[in-house]
């Protein structure tokens, strides 16, 4: 009976196992192999180069730019989207009715095509757009939004925050809905009202939501491609050059597939390490409030 049950379990799990092997395990093994080759994506013949790709990537200016640009985006995007999502969730939570309608409305930007959104934003921020014409004619401000090493990353971070704030607000909203009313009643009896109630009760009780939203937002920063590719192409001066742009340029523009794969592996390692650090920080914060 146990053997029959085990066989049935393997049979039922086989579609997922086959899918994982074809679309995850096999590509991962293939990528690890390609990272040590000089394959140019076209030629059928290629040779192994050892650690040359990794050494070259370590000293590459564009790879270093992608590394620092990711953390620059992170410093701008994560605080904005977390604070915005929490604020939006608090507003929706306080509504007496139509919470579902407003939740869906704010969630819609997340469903919009990244390319379409980026094209619209690029048109709005272009030099001859009505917005810039108004600034020049009435305020005397000549702003090159996407040609500035400071403003270009900020515009991309704000655009992405607009896109994801509704999605993350749903996670905060579910956390707010799950806080028992008895906790607020007990806190009120102890004198925790207004801002104190929010800071000492609501925020600690939202730890699972903060944990999820922060980890998702941090991980997202290592996979940015569409927005900088459409808006700036990685410029100016590598200020919006991300890991995914570097991988794309090397593998598909310059046909250095082996080197591009090595960069992708380095990106995976940096992503894993960064998320691990943020997890440890958040877990320590949660432990102080009783979340073990």
Image (cartoon, helix red, strand yellow):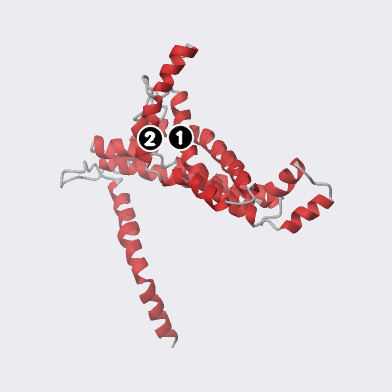
Q: Are marks 2 and 1 in contact (CB under 8 Å)?
A: yes
Q: Residue furthest right?
A: 190
Return the residue nearer the eye: 178 or 257. 178
Residue 276 visible (yes or no): no
Foreground pick, 191 / 267:
191
Q: Which quadrant of the rendered structure holds the N terminus? A: bottom left
Q: Residues within 10 Å of mark 1 (few under 14, many from 20)?
A: some
Q: Position of residue 233 (x, y in %)?
A: 34, 30
- Residue in the picture at 40% in, 44% down: 112
User: Label 2, on which residue?
Assistant: 118
Residue 138: horizontal and vertical position, in percent? Answer: 47, 13
Depicted 246 relative to depicted 101: above or below:
above
Marks 2/1: CA–CA distance: 8 Å
Question: In the image, what residue occupies the spot 42% across and 82% down?
Answer: 5
Q: Residue at x 38, y 35 (%)?
A: 118
- Residue placed furthest toward the left: 44
Q: Residue 124, can we see it?
A: yes
At horizontal 57% and vertical 39% (from top left) the residue drawn is: 84
Earlier residue among tags 2 and 1: 2
Q: Which numbered marker is on residue 159?
A: 1
Q: Is residue 193 left or right of residue 49?
A: right
Q: Element type at marker 2?
A: helix
């Amino acid at each position: 009976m146990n053997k029959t049950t085990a066989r049935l379990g393997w049979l039922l799990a086989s579609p997922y196992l086959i899918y994982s092997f074809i679309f995850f395990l096999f590509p991962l093994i293939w990528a690890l192999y390609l990272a040590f080759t000089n394959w140019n994506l076209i030629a059928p013949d290629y040779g192994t180069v050892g650690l040359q790709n990794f050494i070259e990537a370590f000293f590459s200016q564009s790879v270093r730019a992608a590394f620092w640009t990711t953390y620059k985006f992170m410093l701008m995007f994560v605080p904005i989207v977390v604070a915005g999502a929490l604020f939006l969730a608090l507003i929706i939570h306080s509504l007496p009715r139509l919470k579902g309608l407003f939740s869906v409305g704010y969630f819609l930007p997340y469903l919009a095509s990244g390319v379409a959104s980026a094209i619209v934003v690029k048109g709005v921020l272009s030099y001859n757009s009505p917005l810039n014409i108004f600034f020049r004619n009435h305020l005397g401000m000549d702003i090159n939004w996407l040609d500035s090493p400071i403003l270009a990353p900020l515009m991309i971070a704000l655009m992405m925050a607009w896109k994801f704030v509704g999605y993350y607000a749903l996670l905060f909203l579910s956390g707010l809905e799950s806080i028992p009313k008895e906790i607020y009643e007990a806190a009120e009896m102890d004198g925790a009202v207004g801002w104190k109630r929010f800071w000492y009760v609501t925020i600690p009780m939202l730890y699972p939501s903060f944990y999820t939203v922060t980890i998702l937002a941090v991980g997202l920063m290592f996979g940015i491609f569409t927005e900088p590719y459409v808006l700036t192409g990685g410029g100016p001066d590598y200020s919006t050059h991300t890991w995914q742009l570097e991988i794309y340029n090397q593998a598909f523009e310059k046909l250095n597939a082996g080197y591009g794969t090595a960069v992708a592996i380095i990106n995976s390692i940096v992503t894993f390490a960064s998320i691990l650090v943020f997890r440890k920080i958040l877990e320590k914060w949660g432990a102080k409030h009783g979340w073990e």
